[in-house]
Image (spheres, grey):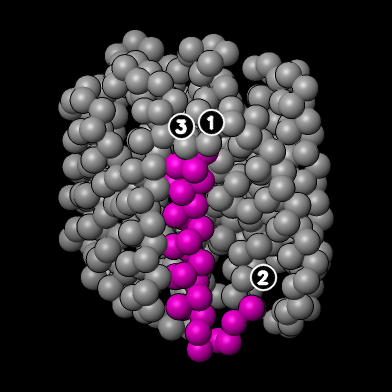
Amino acid sequence: MTVTQWMQRVGVGWMTWELTHSSAWLGIVAAADLAPMLVLGPLGGALSDRVNQVRMLRITQALMVVQAVGLAILAYLGLVNIWVLFLASLATGLLAPFFGASRQSVLPNTVPRSELSTAIALDSALFQATRFIGPAFASLMIPIYGVEGTFITYAVGSFSFLASVFLIDVTMPPRAPRTNRNIWQDIGESFTYVRSHKGIWPAFLLLATASVFVRPVQDMLPGFAGDIFRSDAVGLAYLSSAMGVGAMLSAGFVAFRGRITGLTRHAILGTIGLALSILGFVVSDILWFGVLFSGLIGFTLNTMSTSISALVQTAVHDSMRGRVVSLYQLIFRGTPAVGTLVVGFVSGYVSLRWTFAFSAALMFVVWLVMLPRRRDIAAALEVER
């Protein structure tokens, strides 16, 4: 389902570009999908730690099916305009905090405890890779079937996942007796927990920097394909496919390692690799040069974000899992909304190239800051619970 969801996002992005030819609108529509996580992410996590998480997962997925089918029908009838795309993206964004928190809370209970770290690494790697694999498939589909094909594919994928969710049969761990604290106190406790953790806090800071300043490159690929590389949907397909291949290689690398030890090193190495990859991507207007570095962006970004996800899921206590995971998703899914808006508007004045060149320089600085602390971070994160 996640692959088809990312296919829909590329379809929405490409149709936005065709309707407006505006990088600002690309940022606005992408932000509609991502920004609600900034507000609702902690609430989704706190709610997940209080209610039946399997039931919460089923309800949110059912609502996602409604959104997917509705957009597919409107696209088939030719009734989609920029405001329909904005509202469809906003609907997805409003559901994502509750869906993500419940899914990540259920996941660790589907495998034996002894296999938890391996399962988390595998799920994280595959999930992160779909961010690139889905766009790659979408970019190949659009020239053949049109943007509408991505919407229909997502409708089918989301319904299939809904059916599988109702087949889930897991035993959730017992919870401590509920206190009289309200949900806002639970949210406050999650921030305190993360801030006092010697590994999760710097890992989240690293992820936030990449999410705000680098991850928007994926949402801006239609602009790069059209303005920088002077291509069309076929060029977009090459760029997205290369990013997908890089992510797939990274996913295989992280997943088949099968252990947590050493992932902190890979997360920090991914930071400098990402800086160099972004810099290489923006220095030329030759499409095949861009395709090469697009693949490197996919590999390095996926290695860093997957490593952090696996480390956090392993280190966090079960009683805090839903809330801490929701903060991870707030950073991973919500903060790019800020980045896409900033990049969309700034690039209108200084170009996409110079905007992401600055991002590359910033990631290099972050790498220099994190490098001396890597052993302390690893000691706090690389534990088997």
Assess disc 1: are there few (<14), some (14-19) or many (≥20) residues with their C-alpha within 10 Å of its C-alpha. Answer: few
x 18%, y 60%: residue: 372
Q: Amino acid at mark 2?
A: Val
The mark lying in front, picked from 1 and 3, is 1
Instruction: Decide which of 187, 354 is in the foreground and name it.
Output: 354
Residue plotted at (69% across, 38% down): 152
Residue identifier under label 3: 219
Q: Tell me the element at label 2.
A: helix
Q: How many other residues sit within 10 Å of disc 3, few (<14), some (14-19) or many (≥20)?
A: many
Query: Mark 2 touching mark 3, by CB under 8 A?
Result: no
In magenta, the rendered stretch is 110-138
Which quadrant of the figure has residue 317?
Answer: bottom right
- Which comes sooner in the sequence, label 1 or label 3? 1
Q: Sequence order check: which comes first, mark 1 or mark 2?
A: 2
Q: Position of residue 112 (x, y in %)?
A: 58, 87
According to the picture, the residue beneath numbered tag 1 turns out to be 144
How many numbered circles does the render carry? Answer: 3
* Mark with earlier residue (2, 3): 2
